[in-house]
Amino acid sequence: MKKFIFLSGIILSLYSCESTTYESLEEPEVITGPVTYNANVKSIIDANCIACHNSESQLIPLETYAQVKDATLNTNLIDRIQRQNGTPGQMPKAGRMSQDKINTILQWSTDGLLEN
């Protein structure tokens, strides 16, 4: 009987476990009008890319509007930020950005890579 109660407790405990990520708890950013680098994209790049992609590294720098625009047009930046975790070449290496942030960058590209 004790084993039954113990096993029932474990099963109920495991059944009640739920996987929730912080990403799923974030409120998506509501953007009205066209997406611009200064208003919408710069903060995403600064928070997720600058640590590695700066002028002191050997990687493509992403510190300025011109550098990010060039990387979007002439490298595979869009492809790499959309790759799933664990996929070779996925960026940022520390883990995939939220889909909301990726969508903002995609919309910026669609809207014409506007600066302001």
Image: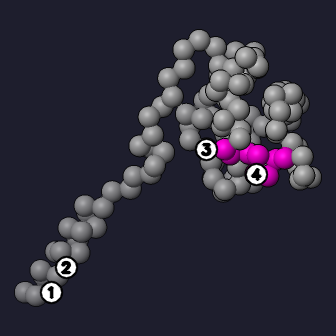
Inter-mark Cα distance, 3 to 4:
14 Å
Quarter of the picture containing the N terminus is bottom left
* Percent x, y of residue 114: 75, 17
Q: Secondary structure at mark 3?
A: loop
Kind of residue indicated by mark 1: Lys
Mark 2 and 1 residues: CB-CB less than 8 Å, in contact? yes
> Which quadrant does the C terminus fall into?
top right
Q: Residues within 10 Å of mark 4 (few under 14, many from 20)?
A: some
Q: Which residue is mark 2?
A: 7
**What is the three-letter code of the residue carrying label 3?**
Met
- Residue sitting at x 90%, y 52%: 56
Is residue 30 shown in magenta? no
Q: For mark 1, what is the residue?
A: 3
User: Magenta segment, principal secondary structure?
Assistant: loop
| Depicted 94 relative to depicted 68: above or below | below
Please indicate, yes or no, whether residue 49 appears anywhere in the rendered image.
yes
The residue beneath circle 4 is 51
Cα–Cα gap, marks 3 and 1 = 45 Å
- Nearer the observer: mark 4 or 2; the answer is 4
CA gap between label 4 and label 1 equals: 53 Å
Question: Quick one: label 4 or label 1, which is nearer the N terminus?
Answer: 1
Residue 107 lies in quadrant: top right
Q: Is residue 70 left or right of residue 99?
A: right
Provide the residue designation for mark 3.
97
> On screen, 71 above or below 61?
above
3 or 4: mark nearer the eye: 4
Residue 40 x %, y %: 64, 26
Q: How many marks?
A: 4
Is 100 rendered above or below residue 16? above
Earlier in the chain: of badge 3 and badge 1, it is 1
Measure the alpha-carbon separation of dots 3 and 2: 39 Å
The magenta stretch is 47-54
